[in-house]
Amino acid sequence: MSTRNGSERRTQVVVIGSGFGGLFAARALRRADVDVTLIAKTGHHLVQPLLHQVATGILSEGEVAAPTREILRRQENAHVILGEVTDIDLDSRMVVSTVLGRTRVHLYDELIVAAGAGQSYVGNDRFADFAPGLKSIDDALELRGRIFGAFEQAELTSDRAELDRLLTFVVVGAGPTGVEMAGQIAELARRTPRRDFRSIDPATARVVLVEAGPAVLPSFGEELGGSARQRLGEVGVEVQLGATVTDVDADGVDIEYTDGHAQRIPAATKIWAAGVQASPLGGVLAGQSGAEVDRAGRVAVLPDLTLPGHPEVHVVGDMAALDDLPGEAQVAIQGGRYAATAIKRRLAGKAPCGFFRYVDKGSMATVSRFSAVVRIGRLRFEGLIAWTMCLAVHLYYIVGFSSRVTTVLHWLLGFVGSGRAQRVATQQQVYGRLALAHLDPQLVPSLTGGHHGAPQEARELRESRPMRCSPLLEARQMTSQTVDRGE
């Protein structure tokens, strides 16, 4: 294929998402004879496993999120686009993205979909108003404001019942995120602000970790899960297993237990860490390819991570349903690199690289200061050595020398000392999400990690298009839209 000046048009690769899958796929194509367009709804790459430290004042948002443009600035074949992908047309090989009313159309030869996942409220999306998840920088800053704001409000009240409500923190879900959040809130309450207040004792705060299942960290096994539960108890976290949340409102949480009895826990601060839902783009892909979608919204892909009937479309990370792969960073990283390798081999006329095989490099979760659990194959680690391993791995994923240096300094301040360097919070951070939703729900990222109206908008956009219309002609006909042809 040639351009107007007669030169050969390079293969156009569109990557959706700037998380681990999308970023590592884009970087793996840096020496390939392709043009890479990376589209993401944020301008940064986020080290999501460290968000709990942003929410509890240990790290700043800049230390866990590096600008995507800065990461890829030396990769000349990479073009970064800010936008929310609202439609993918597989037949026309077209991706539509939009941001603040500006719509852009991108044509592709190869597509890598790594849009990730968001929080799932299991059909109870109204819970989100009172119990934020922890999937983004906005979430972490909102939770920081809610957590530190609870102590500030408690200082102002003389009513005992209200004081107990303000100093009760409920974390729903005993996976890695829930365990890390509960442990850090307990550490924060007992160590950091103990001399900062005059009317209250922050150490009396109640931290409750609620889990519908029978174990803490079930994917880590009984031994490590039991160790984590014991350590949580030692730092003051109240663990409630077999407890299903039936309702959440501004004043507390309603819980039903497996033995049939129910309880209400008055609490001002609630954090939801139970379950994830893949991007709505999974439904868009499935609807056009005939692939199935599981309960978490993940697309059933072929063993080579491609869509049925569409070998040019690669689905990686949290969006791919294959062999019960865990929702971890390593799955996304390996999937992104695999997709990039498959593209390079196809362009070079080489045989396919075989089926995708995930290499399990282990799982880890920080429980509290100087305590963590790590599973690597058959090896199990806990306590200080596991905690040190967690810090080393997290430090590896942080982008930029300066961010790594300041992260280490803040870790020393927060873990060796008792201070927290990032305790500033604003009302805008706490109420901004709800205020935007009140003004226009379309302005707020959906609870499942994408644009609220994406699936419906995608259907309407496809239905409005003439069948078999040339992608280039069609793009020209779309008013107020820009065509990204990679020429």
Image (cartoon, helix red, strand yellow):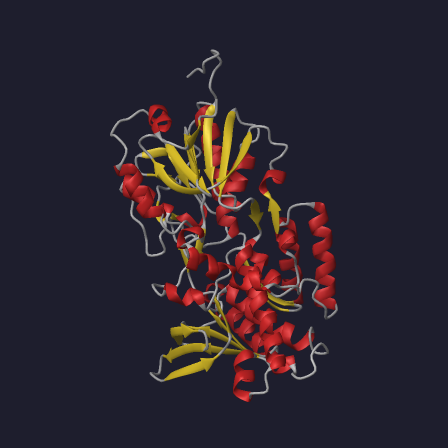
**Residue 304, picture quadrant:** top left
Q: Is residue 202 left or right of residue 457?
A: right
Q: Position of residue 355 (x, y in %)?
A: 41, 39
In this view of the protein, can residue 227 be seen by the observer? Answer: yes
Nearest the viewer among 103 and 60 is 103
Q: Position of residue 50 (x, y in %)?
A: 59, 58
- In the rendered image, the vertical position of residue 213 relative to residue 16, given as above or below: below
Nearest the viewer among 26 and 166 is 166
Q: Position of residue 57 (x, y in %)?
A: 64, 64
Task: Give the residue at x 43% y 76%.
Answer: 253
In this view of the protein, can residue 365 be seen by the observer? Answer: no
**Residue 193, picture quadrant:** bottom right
Farthest-out residue, front? 439
Task: Give the residue at x 75% y 69%.
Answer: 417
Farthest-out residue, top? 6
- In the rendered image, the vertical position of residue 323 relative to residue 235, given as above or below: above
Q: Position of residue 315 (x, y in %)?
A: 41, 42
Task: Give the residue at x 71% y 46%.
Answer: 401
Nearest the viewer among 330 and 39 is 39
Where's the N terminus, which quadrant? top left
Nearest the viewer among 281 and 395 is 281
